[in-house]
Amino acid sequence: MLALRLARGAHPLVLLRRLLVTAAAAGTGFLLLCTLGYAMGHPGAGSVLRLAWCAAPLAATVHLAVAVARTDPATRPRPGLSAVGLGPGRLMVIAAVSTAVACTLGSMLALLFFLHLRGDISGLPFDGAAAELLAADRPLPLAAALTLLALVPIAASVASALVLRPRPARPTEESTGPAAPADPDRPDAPAPAPSGLPWGVALLAAGLAVETYASRAGGSDGLPLPGGLTEPPAGVLAGWALTALGLALAGPGLTYLCGRLLQMVRPGAMRLLAGRVLMEEARRIGRPLGVVCAVASGAYAAAVISSSGSPALPGTGPLTVLGSLLVAGCAVLTLATAAVEARQSRAHTSAALLRLGAPASMLRGSAALRAGALFVVFGPLTWAVAELAALPLVP
């Protein structure tokens, strides 16, 4: 009940982000139900593989839901809340419940739309438009449908609770007693570099190598794709998955490197501020940025392969388009949400700089420098990965 009261009194932008989570959950739930409908009409091993293809939209939806939960003002600890019983643990529960409510609403919308296309709900346009595809002549197994629809709310709420769980304060290195007060004359040390860059580069190289080997070896080890696609070698798909995971892991390290590059060669105040901000926010925005680069490189590679007339990517169907739009949209929205969270975290610093007399143009210039540095590093990387991924499949 408290979560519903907080949702009703939230800011319109906060409500918009929650509605976007609901829409993503509805799309993913509809894909899961369509897989169930296909399995009802075509029993066999192919149905299990089609269900596995829903893992990418499911992961993208959960990623977006966690990002929205992190930026929710209602779940942010504030002075005085602990006195009324709203400590970090209770706020974590509220965030998990709010996420579950938003995703459950999306799952229910997906069920209504699925039943409408099957023809089970009449009186609206397009009644039974996909009756043959969704096996309308067979009774719908309610337990299986509800189980599939529960995947998104459960996964999103558990992930939100794990990310927002209270963490104990780390003791200082100098003593095991209370932390010493900060010295105002001593500047804070920069954030440590993320440790995932070597692993990300290794996975990226391994993915490209696996894809190249699988495309040249050929063979009949294909996996059926939904939506009208043919069966590309399983090794090519495994290579693409490794490449995407490598970009996601390397994102924080590359973002941190952008901050270090901005501060090289006698930086001024603007470059120093921009570099420090990127170093501090490398973990927050680096991984969503890496995911966006993975999605963009995959889309560019698919466009190159399709324009070349390669049989590896002959066409797409409506479910494939829906899944692709879900993954791409959730990736972009997650990056935007992470940027909003980063802006909120440095709001006090920006206000302090303005009070000290820093011009607002310096803050805007610092933001432009950060965006430019990220584009200079991630733009060519995305293009290079896409070209290398598409090269083995272009005739």
Image: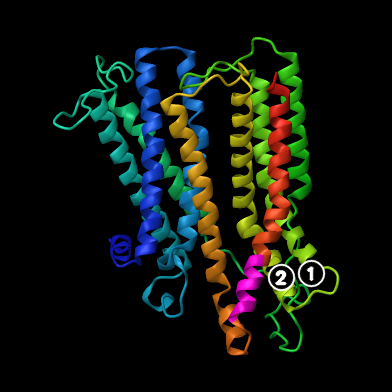
- Residue 106 at x, y = what percent? 33, 43
Q: Which residue is mark 2?
A: 276
Q: Which residue is mark 1?
A: 263
Contact (Cβ within 8 Å) of mark 2 with mark 1: yes
Tell me which residue sits at (60%, 73%) in the image: 364
Tell me which residue sits at (32%, 65%) in the image: 6
What type of secondary structure mainly makes up the magenta span?
helix
Drawn side of residue 162 relative to residue 322, left or right: right
Tell me which residue sits at (63%, 85%) in the image: 358
Verify whether residue 3 appears in magenta: no
- Secondary structure found at label 2: helix
Q: Quadrant of the C terminus?
A: top right
- The kind of residue on which mark 1 rests is Gln
- Residue 58 at x, y = what percent? 48, 38
At label 2, counting other C-alpha atoms closer than 10 Å, the crowd grade (few under 14, some 14-19, many 20 or more) is many
- Residue 158 at x, y = what percent? 47, 48
Q: Does label 2 or label 1 sit earlier along the sequence?
A: 1
Q: Is 272 situated above or below 151?
A: below
Drawn side of residue 244 relative to residue 55, left or right: right
Q: Which residues are magenta?
A: 360-368
Front-most of residues 295 and 300: 300
Give the label, 2 or 1, closer to the camera. 1
- The kind of residue on which mark 2 rests is Arg
